[in-house]
Image (cartoon, grey):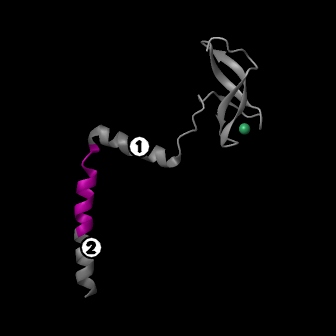
């Protein structure tokens, strides 16, 4: 990919159009597209290598994963147990 030139049309994911569209290269760094402009809505943004940005759900997942890595780990087992006890108590109270 060393033959990229400014103004070349390449595919990339546009966050405004929310899909892959044609983009014109507006800046090149290290022979790679750095910034591109959507040919549909003319929105400038960093070249995303055709990857859609992570959804909010994915970000949340990453956050949880980071917490696990940070050693906050046994949250799942610790959180499940008191929840069960609460349920049992609630059932008894209803009777
Ligand atoms: Zn666009």
Q: Quadrant of residue 64?
A: top left
Find out if the beta carbon at label 1 lies less than 8 Å from the nearest ligand 1 atom.
Answer: no
Magenta residues, dominant SS class: helix
Q: Residue at x 63, y 27 (%)?
A: 47
Q: Is residue 65 left or right of residue 79?
A: right
Q: Secondary structure at mark 1?
A: helix
At which x and y percent is residue 85? 22, 70
Q: Which mark is residue 63?
A: 1
Q: Which mark is residue 87?
A: 2
The answer to whether residue 79 is above or below residue 3 is: below
The answer to whether residue 23 is above or below residue 28 is: below
Q: Quadrant of the C terminus?
A: bottom left
Give 60 or 31, whichever is nearer the viewer: 31
The answer to whether residue 35 is above or below residue 84 is: above
At which x and y percent is residue 43? 73, 34
The answer to whether residue 51 is above or below residue 60 is: above
Q: Residue at x 27, y 66 (%)?
A: 83
User: How much space separates mark 1 and mark 2, taking CA atoms?
Assistant: 28 Å
Q: Secondary structure at mark 2?
A: helix
Magenta residues span: 72-84
Find out if the beta carbon at label 2 lies less than 8 Å from the nearest ligand 1 atom.
Answer: no
Q: Quadrant of the N terminus?
A: top right
At which x and y percent is residue 60? 44, 47
Residue 2 sits inside the magenta stretch: no
At which x and y percent is residue 35? 67, 24
Q: Residue at x 72, y 14 (%)?
A: 5
Q: Quadrant of residue 94?
A: bottom left
Q: Are marks 1 and 2 in contact (CB under 8 Å)?
A: no
State the residue lying farthest toward the bottom: 95
Q: Is residue 13 left or right of residue 87?
A: right
Name the N-terminal-most of marks 1 and 2. Answer: 1
Q: Is residue 67 left or right of residue 34?
A: left
């Amino acid at each position: 990919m060393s033959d990229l030139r400014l103004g070349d049309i390449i595919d990339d994911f546009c966050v405004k159009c929310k899909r892959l569209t044609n983009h014109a290269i507006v800046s090149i760094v290290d022979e790679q597209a750095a910034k591109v402009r959507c040919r549909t809505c003319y929105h400038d943004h960093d070249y995303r290598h055709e990857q859609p940005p992570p959804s909010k759900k994915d970000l949340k997942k990453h956050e949880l994963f980071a917490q696990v890595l940070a050693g906050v780990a046994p949250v799942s087992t610790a959180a499940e147990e008191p929840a069960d006890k609460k349920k049992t108590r609630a059932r008894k109270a209803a009777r």
